[in-house]
Image: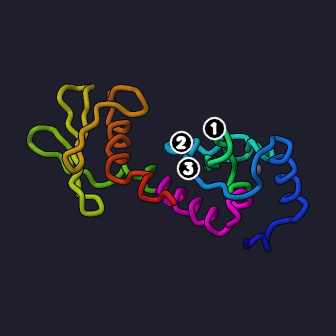
Amino acid sequence: MSMYEIDSAYVRKCQKRLQEWGAPLSGWYCDYIYDVADEEEDADHIELFTCELCDCAQVRFVHVMSHDEYFEPVAVGCICAGIMEGDILAARERERLMKNRAKRKRSFPHRQWSKNWYGNYQLTYQGRKVFINNKCSNRYSVCVDGKTAWSYKGKPLDNFVSAAYAAFELADPIERIRP
Ligand SMILES: [Zn+2]
């Protein structure tokens, strides 16, 4: 364990709560991580998440932790994730990769897209051909490496920006930075 940087009172508080839940103190792993505001340009309007373990209300990157002997996942911030998995450096690295991805995602719609004769947009991103097809004014679909999407977060692609985000999810998936 590399807990050297963390206040031991904080660690004890987290472990006490796990005990109260009847949950294991170690052996947790990160199932997935998500950004509560991955396309939010305006930092003042982000609704942050409250860590389920320490009640810190300032969590932007949520680490969803699972344990083979516990009945439900626990969604926490970076430090609590590090405590639960016994590796704060791994949790920090995961969060760093997510932050970098969030920056790439925010800038993705603003990249140099070229427009072809049919009115479709394209670019090459990390060696992949990314296409945004605009069939009629407010109908978009996207295609990356033969994978196609017509929606983003459950909504039809009715504008360029949401189409670009849908394309980004195919071109730069979170799975690639999973533990
Ligand atoms: Zn926490």
Indicate whether 139 appears above or below 42. Answer: above
Give the amino acid at mark 2. Answer: Glu
Q: Are marks 1 and 3 in contact (CB under 8 Å)?
A: no
Magenta residue span = 82-103
Query: How far from the left and from the top, in percent, is residue 57?
Result: 76, 43
Specify few, some or many for label 3: CA neighbours under 10 Å numbering under 14, 14-19, or 20 or more: some
Separation of marks 2 and 1 at Cα, in angstroms: 8 Å
Residue occupying image coordinates x 39% and y 51%: 173
Query: How far from the left and from the top, in percent, is residue 10?
Result: 86, 58
Q: Is residue 118 magenta?
A: no
Mark 1 CB within 8 Å of ligand 1: no
Q: Are marks 2 and 1 in contact (CB under 8 Å)?
A: yes
Q: Secondary structure at mark 1?
A: helix
- Residue 31, labelled with which disc? 3
Query: How far from the left and from the top, in percent, is residue 7?
Result: 86, 65
Q: Is residue 94 magenta?
A: yes
Looking at marks 2 and 3 on the same chain, the residue that comes earlier in the sequence is marked by: 3
Locate residue 161 relative to residue 44 in the image: left or right. Answer: left
- Residue 45, labelled with which disc? 1
Which is nearer the eye, 120 or 147? 147
Specify few, some or many for label 2: CA neighbours under 10 Å numbering under 14, 14-19, or 20 or more: some
Q: Is residue 109 visible?
A: no
Which is nearer the eye, 111 or 16? 16
How many marks do you count on the picture? 3
Give the amino acid at mark 3. Answer: Asp
Q: Which residue is mark 2?
A: 40
Q: Disc 2 or disc 3, which is closer to the eye?
A: 3
Residue occupying the far right of the picture: 9
Q: Secondary structure at mark 2?
A: loop
Give the amino acid at mark 1. Answer: His
Q: Is residue 17 visible?
A: yes
